[in-house]
Image (tube, helix red, strand yellow):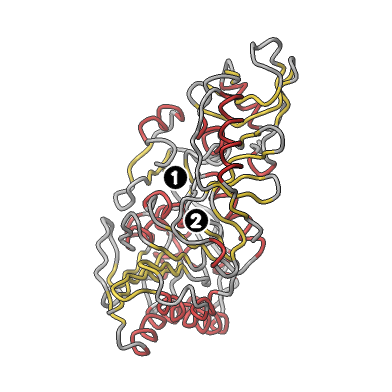
Amino acid sequence: MLLQKLNRKRVKEINRKIEKRFGVNPNFRGLFSEGNWIYIYTGTENLTEISGAVSAGLNIGKFRDEFMPTIEGAQIINPGKNYFMLKSSKDALTWMQGNDLFAGDTGCEVGYVIVISGDDILGSGMYDGRIIRNRLAKNRKLKM
Amino acid sequence: MKAKKPEYSKEFKEYHSMLFDFKEFIEWMQKPLRKSIRVNSIKIDSKRLFEKLGWGHEKIPWAKEGFWVDMKYGTGATTEHAIGYYYVQEASSMMPVEALSIRNGDMVLDMCAAPGSKTTQIGAINLGGTIIANDSNTGRVKSLISNLGRMGIANCIVTKNDGQKLCKIKKFKEKFDRVLVDAPCSEVGTARKNTDSLRVWTPSYVKRISALQKKLICSGFECLKEGGVMVYSTCTTSVEENEDVVKFLLERYENAGTGRINLNARYESAGSGAARVYPWHNDTECAFIAKITKR
């Protein structure tokens, strides 16, 4: 397994970026990474000591310069800003099938936004000022 | 509506006629299986979920978050499923984890974990402990990882090892408070979903898989701490894959005993600490569950 424990400085940087972008500090601790993917692991066992380990914890997002939350990452963050509320459950289905959304002027800043339908948090996408590009993982998209 | 009569060999009929009323069994195999789900209490409570889904539902008595739902198709094709609010899981398949009496904070091993229905069930109970979910098949491990993610489980480590050899790993030996060995089997009990398992059943396959199951149960037992509990389960009917495997373990290890199964379900006793579930008991698939203790 290639999961690496992130040092405090890096974890702090991720928390700060999330706070700046989404308006809440999730206070993540014990984060790990595999490439650019960030994982939260809450178990008590030391990951490096487990033979044959191929994965651990929960994938909460991708971090390069900005943080792109997965569905679970977005649900944990529960944003205070830069989120887009869908108008109907039909829109939610369209989003979950992996389609982009024509959002128009949303009041959100350009960059990653969290997509919400009612009280359900449906992951995140890249907003360019007009369209929210769908960033759901392939295996999470609804096949109808 | 009844499905067409399943195909099976003369050997299959002869063998199973010794176990139960074969005609009744075949009649049950033609009845459609009730759809069931397990609500993911990590993300939502059942009241709120059913308000969203609008489905008719009935509580499954033996499973804390289990429900039969009035949906014939499409239970896995909703937004709520995609964002991890529930897991589509057959009702009898929820029994082994319930029998395992997991306490929050336990160190738990799920030895043959993919695709993860039972691991995610464990995860919803054991939020403060650690789960090691193992499987030996690369493709199945991928679906296990995907399901753990969807259900929001953050305290699980997925390993890809041969279950028979897990006990040889130093970090695994006598390490776990709870062990689940949901062994690969001939799957006769799943025939209400797919009758192929009846058609392909042969005594020689049962003999081969029974040898593997004996190795798996021993490996699981060696991973168990003193005072720990292990559940051995299958979804099949052959004595060689069920009672004989448990008997093999009990004869081999002096410190192995049986525990009392206490499920709010109808079942047939299969010797001390073991239960056989047939479709006519609770309108489910078949299951075999044995509770093992370590002194």
Instruction: Check disc 2 and report its element: helix, strand or loop.
Output: strand
Q: Quadrant of residue B200?
A: bottom right
Chain bearing tag 2 is B
Q: Where residue A131 appears, x then y in whole percent? A: 74, 19
Residue B112 higher or lower than A127, as above or below: below
Q: Where residue A44 appears, x then y in whole percent? A: 44, 58
Callout 2 amino acid = Cys
Q: Using the image as rendered, state which of residue A74 and residue B270 is in the foreground.
A: A74
Quadrant assignment for the N terminus of chain A: bottom right
Q: Is A115 on the left-hand or right-hand side of A118?
A: right
* Crowding at mark 1 (Cα within 10 Å: few <14, some 14-19, many 20+): many
Question: Marks 1 and 2: same chain?
Answer: yes
Callout 1 amino acid = Ile
Q: Residue at x 60, y 36 (%)?
A: A14
Q: Where residue A19 appears, x then y in whole percent? A: 56, 27
Residue of label 1: B37
Q: Is B246 on the left-hand or right-hand side of A81?
A: left
Q: Where residue A16 appears, x then y in whole percent? A: 58, 31
Q: Residue at x 61, y 42 (%)?
A: A10
Q: Residue at x 49, y 49 (%)?
A: B154
Furthest toward the front, the residue is: A9
Residue B49 higher or lower than B277, as above or below: above
Q: How many marks?
A: 2
**Residue B210 marker:** none
Residue of label 2: B156
